[in-house]
Image (tube, rainbow, N blue to C red):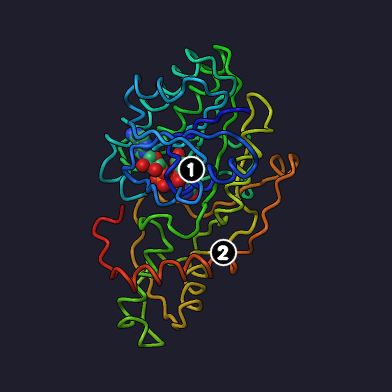
Amino acid sequence: MERHLVTGGSGFIGAALVKDLVEHGYAVRVLDDNSRGHPRRLETVSDQIEVVVGDVRDLAAVEAATEGCDVVWHLAFINGTRHFYERPDAVLDVGIKGTLNTIEASLSCGVRRYVFASTSETYNTPTHVPTSERERLMIPDVTNPRFSYGGGKIAGELMTLHYAGRRGLETVIIRPHNIYGPDMGFAHVVPEIVQRIIDLSDGLQRTQIDLPIQGDGLETRAFCYVADGASGFRIAGTQGHDGEIYHLGREEETSIRDLILGIGRVLGVQLNLVPGELREGGTKRRCPDITKLAALGYEPSYSLSRGLESTVRWYADYFREHGTDVGNGG
Ligand SMILES: NC(=O)c1ccc[n+]([C@@H]2O[C@H](COP(=O)([O-])OP(=O)(O)OC[C@H]3O[C@@H](n4cnc5c(N)ncnc54)[C@H](O)[C@@H]3O)[C@@H](O)[C@H]2O)c1
């Protein structure tokens, strides 16, 4: 049986991927330092997998976890826009050392295939929407700490193709576009908006409120539910061709404004959106062309309203039980 190592495997997407791989008959080992991961996400498969708690910056720990594996999925990274602005040094530390260490360990342990989780952030502002994998990558302003993330991922893609690939590993790069779902942490537009609606509506007692937002909300993204994200990861990583890059997401472009109004609908609160300032570094439109992954059999099955319903309900329940004060928002 093929053995797969998933770094970042107790993270939001990692845990969903681990469960999907187990369901499809693969032996799975997880390497995560649980800085943002939660072992509870793996509870349903805990007796079927191996879990190693360790840091991808520690080469010896990565080598020990990689021993005996056929495929390495490298997902461990510091995610979340707030962290890019506030901790760019940590983002780059984990991003660069983690990628180098997982490649070195894959080479020394005889791994066959190395799968790197990149991101749509590598495009910053794409020249074409829907965007194909051939789009150019860019860092528009190297002095803006936000690009510690996109820059770290661009470096990771180069290392995957021209270091890991050049030295004999099969490689696949996946560029996910806005995967969302229950238990994705708090540094994301969906939990942030749920939290603010609950606070501003006095715990959902008021059914109509003003809601200040960043910018005018007309910027667009394509949102992909996590169950589709996990199957897309598995399909790209196991069936993708050596040296290729695959988009992962859905091809439905939604404005942030419509997303927020949709969240209000699930919560039963009518929202009057009040435009505000937009932080520098964001981009207006993003939506992937997923033709390449679809050709391998990937077909997302969750509509935005179905995925949003379960996600918003999960967060509303969470905030009801624990309160809305989540500090810095893990
Ligand atoms: N969620 C999205 O929409 C999205 C979009 C594009 C790309 N991605 C990429 O997909 C991957 C998974 O994202 P996610 O949303 O599950 O994020 P996440 O933060 O939930 O998962 C990342 C995991 O990495 C772990 N980690 C962080 N630093 C580590 C370290 N030094 N050593 C070991 N483990 C460490 C964290 O504990 C966490 O479990 C990331 O590489 C991310 O950049 C995600």
Question: Which kind of residue does numbered mark 1 sit on?
Answer: Asp
44 displayed left or right of 201: right
**Camera-nearest residue between 235 and 141:** 235
Is 125 above or below relative to 106? below
32 displayed left or right of 164: left
Quarter holding residue 244:
top right
The response on whether ligand 1 sits within 8 Å of label 2 is: no
Label 2: state its secondary structure. helix
Is 317 above or below relative to 151? below
Q: Position of residue 52 (x, y in %)?
A: 39, 33
> From mark 2 to mark 1, how far is it between C-alphas?
28 Å
Q: Which quadrant, please, contains the N terminus?
A: top right
Which residue does the numbered mark 2 point to in the structure image?
307
Say whether residue 42 is visible.
yes
* Residue under the image location 61 percent in, 41 percent down: 247
Which residue does the numbered mark 1 point to in the structure image?
47
**Camera-nearest residue between 134 and 238:** 238
* Residue under the image location 53 percent in, 24 percent down: 69
